[in-house]
Amino acid sequence: MKKFIMAAVGGTLIGVIATTQVAGPLIAQENRRSASVYEQLDLFGDIFERIRAQYVEEVDEADLIEAAIDGMLTSLDPHSSYLSPDDAADMRVRTRGEFGGLGIEVTQEEGFVKVVSPIDDTPADAAGIEAGDFITHVDGDSVLGLTLDEAVDLMRGPVGSEIVITVVREGIEEPFDVTIIRDTIKLTAVRTRTQGETVVLRVTTFNDQTYPNLEEGLRKAVEELGGMDNVNGFVLDLRNNPGGLLTQAIKVSDGFLEAGEIVSTRGRDPQDGERYNATPGDLALGKPLVVLINGGSASASEIVAGALQDHRRAIVIGTKSFGKGSVQTVMPLRGDGAMRLTTARYYTPSGRSIQALGVSPDIVVAQPPRRPEEEEDEGTARSRGEADLRGSLDNDSLTEDERRQIEADRAKAEEAARLRDEDYQLAYAIDILKGLSALGPNAK
């Protein structure tokens, strides 16, 4: 027993000595790192003073410091940046759903401004700007070498003023100019309509209005169809939705899930991770759900699509999404400015990160390019049938009610055909729901 105790004590002493021997170099290394950081800060101070004293023109010290801060943040990733007091105020207005501008959500790639998505019913949308377009010049001035905020500032201006942007688009050899008139952008977060027996929920952004708009619009559409028994399913259209508030993405996902994880976030420190779970209650009462996505669906849109896909609550249709799987935290700073810093990655319920990969649809359906009008006219020309022939016999096997029902069904089919010409992806989604409805509630 005495030998055991001595051995234990000896082991403890050796452990203390070993710890001390290891800790010494670690402390010295940390001290060297701190000294190096202070040397770099001194270097920054020297450069700042030389610019202020010797630059060819007088400079504004506050502008210099803001530029240095912004440069430090934008060097991290495309989504971290410094927000001046004006930019911070503008961002707060945007989350409330109204702001001035062109109506495009942008990011930066290879020095150029890349369109994440145009916003529905805005000047940019009306001018034909598409997700994936690159903006290379604004009013003839190149944006190459500018920060994203500087490029966005170039595109800002008084409501009603004209701007010419130069666009490079995949599949078109030469850059081309687009003239846009700036306007006040009023975001309607959710637009709801019925298409036959289907309720279409078009979500354009995730701001403070999104979930309340979704809930109210869904309820009104169901009432319009005469109750949930007359609804064959729902289409959640997230195409060209650039994202927004994480809290709203969680609420929208929760609106169609009864239980389970919606999304998790993981930061640098594992203890800072968050997990968000669904609560009981499904707005659609278990009715079939189709989610539409494309390359303009980013961030919060991808959280919703990924959660509903992983839980097998929805069929995801369209093309691969944008692939922004990071979380930005906006931190207020002194002087009413703010810092937008990437603080975490988010993961879908199955544990997959979509950063740079995007959400892959269950069924890939591309939106075909719109045909010229003359081709559309040729394609929709009515063909002649037996009933058009002079003296053809009447059909004596149908009652008047049966004849009216056939005509109503034919009208529905023709309306569906028109929708395929206008929006092939949406028509495909509605056809999926019709097929599921025809199979009945027990179809797998």
Image (cartoon, rainbow, N blue to C red):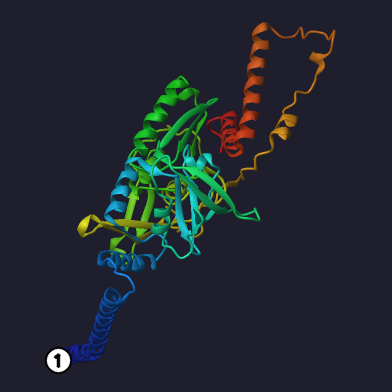
Q: Residue at coordinates 76% horizontally, 7% vertically from top-left?
A: 396
Asked whether, in this view, residue 81 is left or right of residue 131, the answer is left
Give above or below for 114 relative to 182. below
**Residue carrying label 1:** 2
Asked whether, in this view, residue 195 is left or right of residue 207, the answer is right
The mark total stands at 1
Q: Residue at coordinates 55% horizontally, 51% vertically from top-left?
A: 320
Q: Quadrant of residue 228?
A: top left
Q: Position of residue 82 (x, y in %)?
A: 32, 60
Name the residue at the left extreme. Answer: 2
Whether residue 45 is visible to the viewer of this picture, yes or no, is yes
Q: Nearer the viewer, residue 407 or 69?
A: 69
Q: Position of residue 165 (x, y in %)?
A: 51, 51
Q: Position of residue 347 (x, y in %)?
A: 41, 56
Q: Badge 1: few (under 14), some or many (20 or more) residues near its Cα, within 10 Å?
A: few
Identify the secondary structure beneath mark 1: helix
